[in-house]
Every structure is written in structure tokens, then in C-alpha cells.
Image: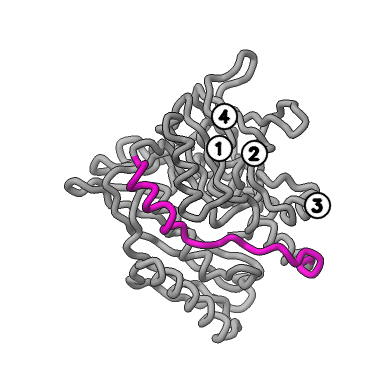
Amino acid sequence: MVMGISKISKIITLSHGGGGREMWELINDLIVSKVPEKFRNVLDGVGLDVLDDGVAIKVGDVYVVMSIDSYTVKPPIFPGGDLGVLAASGTINDLLMMGAKPVGIIDALVVEEGMEVDLVNGLIQSLINTAVSEGVAVLGGDFKVMPKGSLDGIIITTAGIGIARKLIVDVNIRVGDKVIVTGPIADHGATVIAAQLGLLNMSKDLVSDVRPLSKYMLPLIDTYGDHIHAARDPTRGGLASTLNEWVVNRDLTIIVDRSKIPIREPVKKFLDMLGIDPLNVASEGVAVLAVDPVVADEVVSYLRRLGLDKASIVGEVVKPPSGIARGRVLAKTEVGGITFIEASSSPTPRIC
């Protein structure tokens, strides 16, 4: 989402890729502010005018939805998944969050000279297996090799195509909406942090949640799509970044109850040990929804019947309370206090 921006820094830092406020500001300064408003979307669709998980154009009675993302993670294989699963799942989930049924992906690979062919083969096989298991075609792509030392391993870029009867666009969030989280947060980010720090042996219960969400989101969209006003997978920047993006520069406030946010105990203990707030840590198999309050309880029950037994209502969209600036996210703490939730950059920018 576009926000008031200060002058960008003179160099790019890791925080600019972390999914928080620094990244939003850089995107606005480098891209959005340079594109004339009439060229920010086409054919009654959405694009740079809303900065959602994807873009869309209207073709007849449907929307063609597209999403593109680059994925790079270290290590490329981690408990629960690998870079190939991550790339396919991330793009499929971005399409789903726009209300679309994913139908195809295109991939572009940039590989550093010297990487083992078996490793690259395994990652690409994971990408293909993940897409095919979801009924998503792998349509083509590109392959490049960079000289040794000019790239840290491998980058996979995937572009996805989906079809939607009705779009879910996050700018439609409104006062009264209930905020639903479909499952425990921060599993992916915590696992990659542990792998990067060499701490997996002392945290054996950590495992990434990376997966496509088609089997949950498609039936949910079919049944309750008219009542879902916003949807996002909380990847870089985590839940905190998602909620802040939804209300920034708008006459809205989100209040969440931290005690109701599902977090697996091993994840909470590990992140507490490092002093990292789980709300700022990425998930790769969770959706965050803003849902009409009339059906919010039904939606949670429906998700649980689909197998998401930790799905929960964790907050609500309200008018800004007296004395609180608009566009902020507040949290009721476990001990009864109220704090701000900031959109901090991910503590590990190379987690997706």
C-alpha cells in the first residue's frame, strides 16, 4: 500500500527486502510514484493502484489474475520444504488471496556457476511436483547462469495465472470486519532462522509450514467469497506487516488479541529465546482474512471442518479510538495492556 514517504536512503540494505515499512517506502519511491495514475491498472482491473498480492484485468465476465515473485532462501533445503516448494506455493497462494483459482505458472531460474546439478534438479522437481499436485500447469520459463561469486546460489522467479469470478482486494476492508488467522503463525520464519544460526539440533520441533492453500481457500471462496473483504498470506514481515498494510493511511484501526493468535509452543519458545516477536516472522502456509462479522464464526467453523483446526478470530477492524492515530494496529497483551504492533522488517530477509 502507498503511504507517506520520506526520502529514500542512498544505498539498498537488507531491511529494504524484509517486508516492512522500509520496503513499502522504497517501492513507492522507486516505482509507484513514477507511474502516472492512469497507467497503474488496465481493463477495469487492479494493479499499482492497490498493491495487493497480484494484479488483474477483466476479460468478459471473469478476471485474469497474475502474480509474480522471486524466491531465494538460505539454506535452499530446510525442515518441511525447500526452495522449489516455496516458489510454487508462494505464487499459488498469492493468486488464491486475490480470489482466483490458479491455473498455470511460468518460472525463471538464475543459477550460480558451480552449483551441483543434483541440487538444482531436486529443487525444480519440488516446484513441478507442487504445482502438478494442485492441478496447476507449468507453462514455460527461462534459465540463466551467473559467474561464480556474482550470485549467492539460486533464485527462482515464478509468475502465476489464475481466474476469478470476483476479486478479493484488500482495500475493501471495513469497520466491523473480523480478522481471522487460519493456523499457527511464524513456523517458516522460525525454522529458517534456526537453520541459518545452526540451531536446528536444539529446536527439533521446528518445521516450515510451506504449502499451497488451494484445498482450503477454493472451497472457502466458493462458499463465503462475497463476505471476504481482504485476504493475505503473511510472508515477509509476518502478521504484523499484513495488518499494518491493510490500514495504513486509512481511517481504520485493527485491534488484535495476542492471546488468541495461534502459535505453536516450540516456535514461541525459540523466538522468545532470541527476543524476536512472532508477529514479525513469516508464515508460508497460513492465510489472514478480514471477514464480515455476520459470518465470521461460520467461517472459522468451516475452516476447522476443512482441517484447519487452529483457525481463530484474532481481532477486529474499528474506527480509530480517541487519541490514537489513524492507520495503526493495536494489540491487547496477554497481561491486559495495549501496545502498538509495528510493521518491522523481517529479522531474516532471505526467508522467501
Q: Residue 108, percent across and down?
A: 43, 69
Residue closest to the far left: 60
Q: How many residues crowd mark 4 within 10 Å: few (<14), some (14–19), many (20+)? A: many
Q: Position of residue 295 (x, y in %)?
A: 42, 34
Disc ID at residue 179: none
Amino acid at the residue labelled 3: Leu
Query: Residue 29 in magenta?
Result: no
Contact between marks 1 and 2 (CB within 8 A): the answer is: yes
Q: CA distance from mark 2 to mark 4?
A: 14 Å
Q: Residue drawn at (32%, 52%), measured in percent from left and top?
A: 65
Q: Toward the viewer: 153 or 113?
A: 153
Q: Determine which of the numbered discs, if any, sits on residue 254 in the image.
A: 4
- 43 vs 325, left or right, is left
State which mark lies toward you, 4 or 1: 1
Which residue has dot 3 on it? Answer: 274
Answer with the quarter of the image where residue 298 lies. top left
First in sequence: mark 2 vs mark 4? 4
Mark 4 to mark 1 CA distance (whole Å): 13 Å
Question: Which residue is denoted by mark 2 in the rendering?
Answer: 260
From the image, state whether disc 2 or disc 3 is nearer to you: 2
Q: In the drawing, what numbered circle is on residue 313?
A: 1
Specify the amino acid type for callout 4.
Ile
- Determine crowd level at label 3: few under 14, some 14-19, many 20+ residues with C-alpha closer than 10 A: few
Instruction: State the SS at label 2.
Output: helix
Q: Is residue 6 above or below residue 306?
A: above
From which residue to which does the magenta span run? 199-225
- Quarter of the image for residue 329 reads top right
Q: Nearer the viewer, residue 253 or 333?
A: 333
